[in-house]
Image: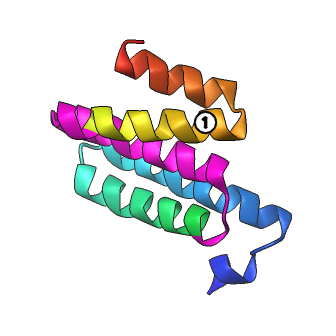
Amino acid sequence: RALLAAAGTPAAARASEVLRWVARTHVVDGDTAAALDCLDAALAVAVAWGDDRATGYAVNSIANVRWFEGDIEAAAALYGEARALAERTGDGRLAGMAAQHLGV
């Protein structure tokens, strides 16, 4: 409820990002399942608010975990999706990260 209540506020823009940070801590601990749970939440928040930029970062982060797990095909598809979102939103940083992972 707290995330939904934040919609449209400055806090809303940070919620998906905070969830991605928490996911990174789980990856460092080797708990990719917990990381993916956090990233699924980050993605859901971004999509619910219609934030394509945050959606792209969440998708890119999910791709990173899939790559870490060794699922290269899933990671590549997700990096492609993140890159498309980055290009649509004009986010050069995200586009570059996704392209680098794709070897472009």
Q: Residue at x 16, y 37 (%)?
A: 71
- Is residue 34 depicted above or below 59 in this figure? below
Residue 56 percent coordinates (x, y): 55, 45
In the picture, which quadrant includes the C terminus? Answer: top left
Image quadrant assignment for residue 10 = bottom right
Residue 102 falls within the magenta-colored stretch: no
Tell me, yes or no, if residue 75 can be seen here.
yes
Residue holding disc 1: 86
Image quadrant assignment for residue 96 = top right
Viewer-nearest residue: 92 or 19: 92
- Give, as a single range, the part of the protein colored magenta: 48-74
Viewer-nearest residue: 34 or 43: 43
Image quadrant assignment for residue 2 = bottom right
- Is residue 41 depicted above or below 17 in this figure? below
Residue 63 percent coordinates (x, y): 35, 39
Q: Residue furthest left?
A: 70
Q: Which structural element holds mark 1? A: helix
- Is residue 98 depicted above or below 69 in this figure? above
Q: Residue at x 69, y 32 (%)?
A: 91
Main secondary structure of the magenta stretch = helix
Does residue 9 appear left or right of residue 56 in this picture? right
Does residue 5 appear left or right of residue 73 in this picture? right
Residue 75 percent coordinates (x, y): 28, 36
Does residue 93 appear left or right of residue 79 in this picture? right
Q: Residue at x 25, y 33 (%)?
A: 67
Tell me, yes or no, if residue 24 can be seen here.
no
Viewer-nearest residue: 74 or 42: 74
Residue 45 percent coordinates (x, y): 57, 68
In the picture, which quadrant includes the N terminus? Answer: bottom right
Q: Residue at x 49, y 60 (%)?
A: 43
Residue type highlighted by circle 1: Ala
